[in-house]
Amino acid sequence: MARRTALLYSRALRNRWLPVALTLCATGGVSTLAVAADTIKIGVIAEAQAIAGASIPQAAQLAADEINAKGGIDGRKIELVTYDDHSSSADAVRAFQRAVSEDKVVAVIGSYISEVVLALEPWAARLKTPFITPGAASNEISLSVHKDYEKNKYTFHGYLTSDALANSVCDAAKDVLVDGMHMKTAVIMSEDAAWTKPLDVAYEACLPKVGLKVLDHIRFSPDTTDFTPIFNKIEGVKPDVIITGISHVGVQPTVQWKTQEVPIPMFGITSQASSSTFWNDTNGAAAGVVLQAVSAPDAPMTPKTIPFADAFKKRFGNFPSYAGYTSYDEVYFIADAIHRAGSTDADKLVAALEKTDWEGTIGRVQFYGQADTFTHSIKYGKGLITGLMSQWQDGKQVTVWPKELAKGKLKFPAFVKLNASN
């Protein structure tokens, strides 16, 4: 009797779902997606209270809403499940575990902090879940994929590696500082973090090649509160420029640079300065700071850049940080990969992501392959992702490099004395 009842129940279920499945197939729906849940869940793990990290979940939500407004992924809506990791690797790991095991996400966008991403990478492997960082830079993220592809293939480096970032800064320095302003010497000033170790190695290699002799190399703790001794030491060797590698800090060194009237320009990577709140955060001390970024509110890297930046500001009240541009793009190309794969199966999604060729807000996104050193990192170079340099001027970020995107020329506060070594 029990067997007969079960058989009748099975037939009833089949008869209930068969017309739905046939309808989806007839309208072009993908069968492997049609029988799954109503929504496709994507996890977003970010430093929601941090200047650079706050844009990550906001931009991702904006992208998901736009995609859903156009019908979603083959008729299925994207549902973002967001988690604040409080800039903690331990909290991020717990969030990743919950995202996959309890909330049933099919992919995770996570963190701009390299230490956090490096802690999550093994969990992406264990839980076989595609994972993309929108802002961490450490070379080790993609080097790990290259060294053990079968294990770590689920991790994608959705931002430039430290090596590529250094090359971007050096390319800009050659055009702007050496050729344009005849600078000859530099001091590297970087925070002590996982992402800056390879960054500084690359700086030391590429700066002399473009014509900037490195006079000193200073690494400081991200917990530093008084930069007076550091700036005093830099002033003592009289470089033409300070080449920066800072992300976890930014407000404090910038404020002290201004209040102490350090006469040397700062040029390089300062992630917090990429947020449009940075001017107010520093009470205007940001004036003259030059920063590397992958996009900017005034720079049409692609036709999508400015419309996104404007939409983000309209919704959230400020322009996104650098990691906002990338997280926005990542939702889109994850959705595109799911559509092309016709599935949310992890291995099929990885294979589809590897074939990504997506024009986003930061340029043309493609990933290096298994044979490349930086496997699964986005490609750097002309026609792909090159980055740009912006300078804070009169409360706004003004793009100053490359020439074809520049909206203004370099303009420094009166206390900055150019070409100290000349």
Image: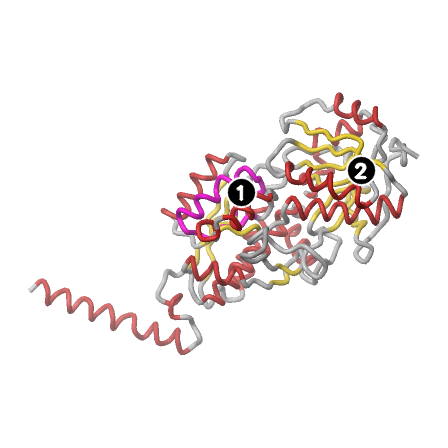
Q: Position of residue 206 (x, y in %)?
A: 75, 44
Q: Residue at x 42, y 57 (%)?
A: 346
Which amino acid, by three-letter code, is at mark 2?
A: Ala
Q: 403 or 279, which lies in front? A: 403
Is residue 122 shown in magenta?
A: yes
Q: Relative to 50, is 332 above or below?
A: below
Q: Position of residue 372 (x, y in %)?
A: 58, 55
Q: Position of residue 409 (x, y in %)?
A: 86, 48
Residue highlighted by disc 1: 46
Left or right: 377 as drawn, with respect to 205: left
Task: Say few, some or many: other residues with alpha carbon within 10 Å of mark 1 (under 14 / 14 to 19 / 20 or more).
Answer: many
In the structure shown, which secondary structural element does the residue marked by tag 1 occupy? strand
CB under 8 Å between discs 1 and 2: no
Q: Quadrant of the N terminus?
A: bottom left
Left or right: 212 as drawn, with respect to 147: right
User: Residue 26 shows which numbered tag?
Assistant: none
Which amino acid, by three-letter code, is at mark 1?
A: Ala
Is residue 415 shown in magenta?
A: no
The way the protein has been coloured in the rendering is secondary structure
Residue highlighted by disc 2: 287
Which residue appears farthest toward the bottom when viewing the image?
26
Q: Which span of residues is magenta-colored?
A: 110-133
First reached walking from the N terminus: tag 1 or tag 2: 1
Left or right: 298 as drawn, with respect to 104: right
Q: Residue at x 81, y 42 (%)?
A: 393
